[in-house]
Image: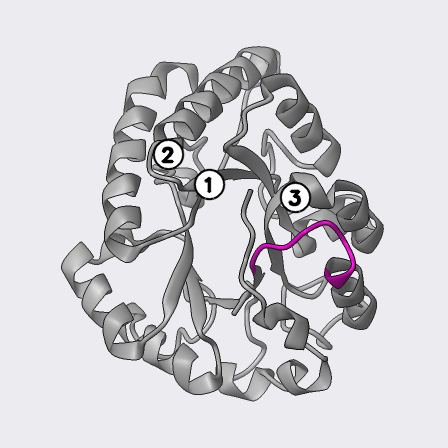
Amino acid sequence: MRLAANLSLMFTEVPLLKRFQAAKKAGFKTVEIQFPYVESIEDLVAAKNEAGVEVCLINVPAADLMEGGEGLASVPNKEAEFEAAIKQCYQYAKALDVKLVNVLPGRCLDESKKAEYLKTLKRNLKKAASAFAKYHILVTFEAVNTKDMPGFLIHNSEQMHDILIELDHPNLKMQFDIYHMQIMEGHVDKTIKKYGDLIGHIQFADTPNRGEPFSGNLNFHDIFENIHFSHYHGYVSAEYKPTKQTEDTLDWMQQFDLKWLDTPAKLK
């Protein structure tokens, strides 16, 4: 099943280890976690196995990014820390049988250093892509909107495209977050059709408040149809902030024809 639920934003009514079972009960066979490192590998594996779900994606550790800092992946004096983050991520990915890991480029808070930060990001993306290729784990990197995260280094699909073309690494693709890209660019359905073969993972939430489908102004009928008929054949993950109890926000699962997501993911 290629439809997934993000356990970092959804089912937060219960602790993380109980969200695996909550997601399964709600109809999800696959989940993802932004940063699983708050829990031990052993506890996460036990929770995953007990629920009988697959974990499709986790993020590489990003240090202080979520607290307003610059993160790791683009910061020139933190390359050794990024390499350590790759190793930690691999330990969790291996144990959880994760198929993809995502790199968050992070912020550049000094505009005069942007070129240096971009060079560092590209070096680190190549390192990560090569390191995980040995274990058949695909690496993605993500653009994030600059309204929610001011100063985010990579914030549109064209930037991701240009980096992919320049690096030309077979184990590196873009993570396309519909919420972030709609805010920055609009017309996400057209962008997905344009870059489908370069996308390694898709996440979705409505705009403008990152809620579930039908809580905002996006036409998810068109969006899902465009994903269906694009060159993208990976996971499609709900990564939204529920406007009410998570279980009460899942009407969209019945309103869309999602049978096409029953086919196995093709990640490369």
Q: Amino acid at mark 1?
A: Leu
The residue carrying mark 3 is 145
**Which residue corresponds to the image point at 53% horizontal and 13% vertical from the top-left?**
119
Which residues fall within the magenta stretch?
Answer: 228-235
Label 2 to label 1: alpha-carbon separation: 7 Å
- Give x and y (percent) for residue 15: 29, 73
> On the picture, is 239 further left or further right than 42?
right
Q: Is residue 183 magenta?
A: no
Q: Position of residue 14 (x, y in %)?
A: 33, 78
Q: Which residue is at a point 29% across and 19% down the rendered structure image?
A: 80
Would you identify the image quadrant in which residue 18 lies?
Answer: bottom left
Indicate which disc, 1 or 3, sits on the residue closer to the N terminus. 1
Residue at x-position 62% and y-position 69%: 261
Q: Residue at position x 64%, y 17% from top?
A: 166
Q: Is residue 74 visible?
A: no
Residue nearest the viewer, comparing 117 with 146? 117
Residue 29 on image: x %, y %? 44, 74
Q: Quote the CA–CA distance across marks 3 and 2.
A: 27 Å
Asked if the residue under mark 3 is in contact with the one under mark 1, i.e. CB atoms within 8 Å, the reply is: no
| Nearer to the camera, 190 or 72 | 190
- Crowd around label 2: few <14 · some 14–19 · many ≥20 (10 Å): many
Q: Earlier in the sequence, mark 2 or mark 1?
A: 2
Q: CA distance from mark 1 to mark 3?
A: 23 Å
Q: How many marks?
A: 3
Q: Earlier in the sequence, mark 3 or mark 2?
A: 2
Q: Which residue is mark 2?
A: 132
Label 1 vs label 3, nearer the camera: 1
Q: Quadrant of residue 11?
A: bottom left
Q: Quadrant of the C terminus?
A: top right
* Above or below, 108 relative to 24: above
